[in-house]
Amino acid sequence: MSRKAQLDEMANLEGNSVAHRVLYGDDAGLREADLYQDQATKTSETHTWNEDDIDYFRTKAQGRAARELKRREEDWDGRTYESLEAEAFRLIEVFIQAQMR
């Protein structure tokens, strides 16, 4: 698999993970988020990532998380999209710091 394809896969997994994490606090939702993140982590360990890779990943992961959040509006439980997005983007940065630097 090419480097770009790995970044795309990793970004989709992490975007899904953070969307589930901020939307669902129950055990099932968190287990699913953990599965996505574990897969993203395994992929992240295959390379040393440069700043261009990280910027690309960030943009793709944020886009995936934003789409998932918008798609699941019925699960916002009175929270605003902006607050959910901010938390999701923060979690993406945590992943970047822990797994890509």
Image (cartoon, rainbow, N blue to C red):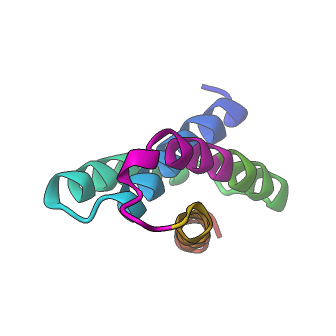
Q: Which x, y percent locates residue 5?
A: 65, 30
Q: Which x, y percent locates residue 68?
A: 51, 43
Q: Which x, y percent locates residue 42?
A: 42, 49
Is 66 magenta? The answer is yes
Q: Is residue 52 left or right of residue 72?
A: right
Which residue appears at 21% of the width and 54% of the height? 31
Quadrant placement of the C terminus: bottom right
Q: Which residues are magenta?
A: 61-79
Which residue appears at 38% of the width and 59% of the height? 23
Q: Quadrant of residue 70?
A: top right
Quadrant placement of the N terminus: top right
Q: Which residue is farthest left?
A: 27
Is 24 magenta? The answer is no
Which of the pair 22/76 is nearer the observer?
76
Q: Which residue is farthest front?
A: 78
Is 71 situated above or below 47? above
Q: Which residue is farthest right?
A: 52
State the predominant SS element of the stretch in magenta: helix
Is 14 situated above or below 4? below
Which residue appears at 61% of the width and 70% of the height? 86
Q: Which x, y percent locates residue 88?
A: 54, 64
Which of the pair 9/86 is nearer the observer?
86
Report whether residue 19 is seen: yes
Is 100 situated above or below 43? below
